[in-house]
Image (cartoon, rainbow, N blue to C red):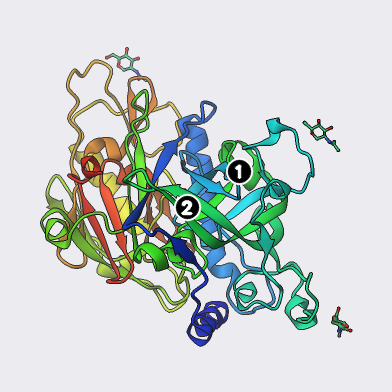
Amino acid sequence: MGSTSRLSFTLFLFFGFSFITCTNCIEYLKLALVQKNNPLSSPAQLLSSDTHRVSTLFSALHGRRGSLKSPLVSGASTGSGQYFADLRIGTPPQSLLLVADTGSDLVWVKCSACRNCSVHRLGSKFLVRHSRTFSPHHCYDSLCRLVPHPSHTQTRTCNHTKIHSPCLYSYSYVDGSTTSGLFSKETTTFISSSGRVTKIESFSFGCGYRVSGPSVTGASFNGAQGVLGLGRGTISFSSQLGRVFGNRFSYCLLDYTISPPPNSYLTIGTFQNDAVSRKLFSYTPLVINPLSPLFYYIAVEGLFVEGEKLPISPSVWAVDENGNGGTVVDSGTTLTFLAERAHRQVLAAFQRRVRLPQVEGVDLGFDLCVNVSGAGKVKLPTLSFSLAGKSVFSPPARNYFIEAVEGVKCLAIQAVKEGSGFSLIGNLMQQGYLFEFDRDRSRLGFTRHGCALR
Ligand SMILES: *[C@@H]1O[C@H](CO)[C@@H](O)[C@H](O)[C@H]1NC(C)=O
Ligand SMILES: *[C@@H]1O[C@H](CO)[C@@H](O)[C@H](O)[C@H]1NC(C)=O
Ligand SMILES: *[C@@H]1O[C@H](CO)[C@@H](O)[C@H](O)[C@H]1NC(C)=O
């Protein structure tokens, strides 16, 4: 793979993009994140869609290897228990709900070209002809080389003197789902933290006229109108807006089982001063896997259950020469996945230390479930991750035990086959923490005392 991403990188340096202009720039941008709980999604379905997503993400890594000819495969939008952001796009603005996804780069929305659309369609698709500011990128535009094309001859046959030669894009998913249409630019509107209206012009996104398949239309997509890619690629939402507001973003994912769910936020730019951050945050370096430059990797060094260090060889956490292994922080997957050898140790340690009756004979799909119904105050063993940069992540038990059926809690950590996957910290594990992806300094900050700050 490499070739694709290296090409993008070269282009980036070569043309020195500055394709966003910003009127009344504010210090940072704050978007509400909505957790839409899919009522149809039982823990068993959650498990199955998350497992599917993890394999999709992993194939995305391997789908790119080798040639520029095969279209990029994006891992976005499978999985459940997702967080959604409201993007206002067009003039006048149309509001669309998008899956916030750190595991992909392209921002795309479902588009419709109807001329005199019924108002009922507002919010279900982006109605291109109801906007004065929509325009597709030209196929000759350097940005057009950053998206996969439905036909690989397109850039070669692009006639740069012809005005109406739009940039076509096509994203495929492993299960055959696709989104394709015009790679375009639009004005997006945000309400800043101080309540001021801020407009960003020339925001690049995929206008998906053709969207099909279970990953992007099925129950796990949960009625969303597209994907807000937050990955490390040049065209992601965080990369584009980072050039205006500062190259870092943060979010706080709050417990969505609370009813009504509290507001979570996605912030682009810096919202607190460095002196405050230094006191509040623990930091671990963001690692780059050259074979998978889109994802946010961190380096796990060890695991502890009730303070006991588990005997896991450091090689279990490493990224090998084929790009396998490593640990990805992902907002679009709910559960956490660990390399088999680490998972085996975690499971054994929990089985040894849990003081509640283990539920057997009921197949819930999880490896360890305990009966908490008669237990009063439930005490579950603690889990912590020691990370590179001498930081320790010690989430509360509700971040790794999920109520599978009433009165039964299950360990929400699954095994990933080594050599065909990576470990992944899902959004349940991240709950209640403020995470800051500081891309300039290539580090991930986290704090349990940050969600109330904003
Ligand atoms: C467009 O919509 C308006 C209001 O919904 C309606 O009055 C008008 O007849 C429609 N025009 C066409 C060409 O369909
Ligand atoms: C490119 O487009 C221009 C203007 O439409 C046309 O005159 C020219 O013949 C086209 N060139 C090719 C190679 O198609
Ligand atoms: C959990 O324990 C209670 C008694 O404390 C029992 O009635 C119930 O059937 C158990 N549930 C499961 C799923 O084993």
Residue found at the very far front of the displayed protein: 24
Q: Quadrant of residue 182?
A: bottom right
First in sequence: mark 2 vs mark 1: 2
Between 447 and 404, the one nearer to me in the picture = 447
Residue at image position (33%, 71%) is: 287
Crowding at label 2, few (<14), some or many (≥20) Cα neighbours within 10 Å?
many
Give the structural element (helix, strand or loop) at label 2: strand
> Which tag is nearer the camera, tag 2 or tag 1?
1
- Ligand 2 is located in which of the four quadrants? bottom right
Q: Is residue 427 visible?
A: yes
Please say if 2 is above or below 375. Answer: below
- Residue 101's tag is 2
Residue at the spot x=40%, y=41% of the render?
Answer: 32
Image x and y of residue 332, in percent: 46, 48
> Which residue is disc 1 drawn over?
225
Q: Quadrant of residue 288?
A: bottom left
Decide if residue 220 is on the left or right side of residue 165: left
Identified by mark 2, the residue type is Asp
Disc 2 residue: CB within 8 Å of ligand 3: no
Q: Secondary structure at mark 1?
A: loop
